[in-house]
Amino acid sequence: MRNIQNLLDLNKKKILLRLDLNVPIKNGKILDSTRINKILPTINFLLKSNAKIIILSHVGRPNGKIVNELSLKPICENLKEKINSEIRLVTKNLKEINSNNLFINSDEKILMLENIRFYKEEEENNYEFAKHIASLGEIYVNEAFSCSHRAHSSIHEIPKFLPSYSGLQLETEINALKKITSEIKRPITCIIGGSKISTKINIIKNLIHKFDSIVIVGGMANNILEYKGIKIGNSIREKNCNKIIEEIFNISQKANCKIIYPEDVVVGNDLNGSSKVKELNNILKDEMILDIGPKTIKKIKDIILNSNTILWNGPAGYFENINFANGSFEIAKEIAKETKNGNLYSVLGGGDTVSVINKIKLFNNFNFVSTAGGAFLEYLEGKDLPGISALN
């Protein structure tokens, strides 16, 4: 991929900048601006280069219709404050505008086009729609890694019509992921959580051959415990997973990759209740496993201490209730400490993982934190991402 930093002359060039500004909004207020903050270096770089910026983005799922609640207006206002520069939101029908009537005043530097998903052609990956949008600019920049697993017009089709480059953040994300998939410094460990093992099976199968240890926590671990003959009470579990789990253990044995799962747990009678540490042979019928216990935490910490590279995706328990957040918090603190001491290269990803580290204000204590969600997971599965292929 070519990076936008490699271009020597961006003076007054019209840059179509695809961003992912799909942030949570309630009653017109932004609840989490992490994704906005991460693209600021690219915006500032383009402003410093005296480029003309045309922002393409989306929020929510309007399904090709205009939905006022999904306007980019609050995001536009938030970004305006962050960069201390005027941004005009263009609400006119995109199919009716051309490049000549975009920058009305010569001193205008940034425009934001209204929600690109207001047009059904976006998600249809429509050739003519992409061609028209491409005609509004001179250079295309993809700074939306989190959308790059989508074959949509503004991600996959526009690069066919314009010189296309990756943004600063997108390249950083790819380089970070390479360090846990192809440019690995061993020993390397994956800590993976979540509620369903079936949604992560392809990641586990792809990583087993590359990783030294895979630590399975969260609701996913309940299936492994049940497979091992442990009574897990009223805990969340996924049906018909024994074949998947058997496959994981068989592949890991051949690949010499250790599979680690909880040795003790923290239970509760419901999600909002209090917690109790339990040995695996002592879980009652009405109890739910909602976190990992102290012995398991110590084992995971020891694994972190003996690793040079860590990938963490998915919390260790139901962290939304502080009574079941200790496992996730302790993992986060240990990875952060070893990263800060220069003993570890750490990559974190997934919305819940980001929520965990935000809760204890550790976001900036890791080498890389991905907010990409689906694209992050598909990359780890070894899939080709349409948005990345389009830039190559």
Image (spheres, rainbow, N blue to C red):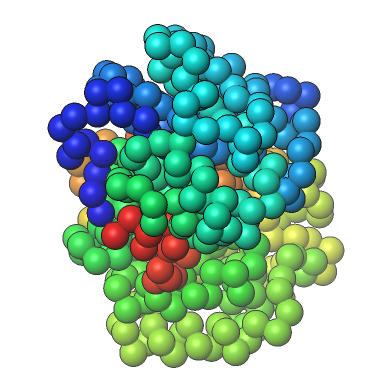
Q: Is residue 40 above or below residue 310?
A: above
Residue appearing at x 53%, y 58% in the figure = 127
Residue closest to the eye, 22 or 216 = 22
Q: Is residue 247 above or below residue 64?
A: below
Q: Is residue 291 left or right of residue 268?
A: left
Q: Is residue 158 above or below residue 15?
A: below
Residue appearing at x 44%, y 51% in the figure = 158
Work out which residue is located at the far right of the displayed protein and give it: 286
Q: Residue 41 location, x and y as percent? A: 33, 27
Question: Quarter of the image containing the N terminus?
Answer: bottom left
Q: Residue 2 location, x and y as percent? A: 23, 49
Q: Residue 324 location, x and y as percent? A: 65, 46
Q: Is residue 185 above or below residue 110?
A: below
Q: Is residue 321 left or right of residue 5?
A: right
Residue appearing at x 74%, y 50% in the figure = 63
Badge count: 0
Tell me which corner region of the image, top left, top right, bottom left or bottom right, holds residue 143: top left
Question: Quarter of the image containing the C terminus?
Answer: bottom left
Residue 64 in view, yes or no: yes
Q: Is residue 177 left or right of residue 90?
A: left
Q: Residue 151 location, x and y as percent? A: 52, 61
Tell me which corner region of the image, top left, top right, bottom left or bottom right, holds residue 140: top left
Residue appearing at x 30%, y 82% in the figure = 256
Residue 313 in view, yes or no: no
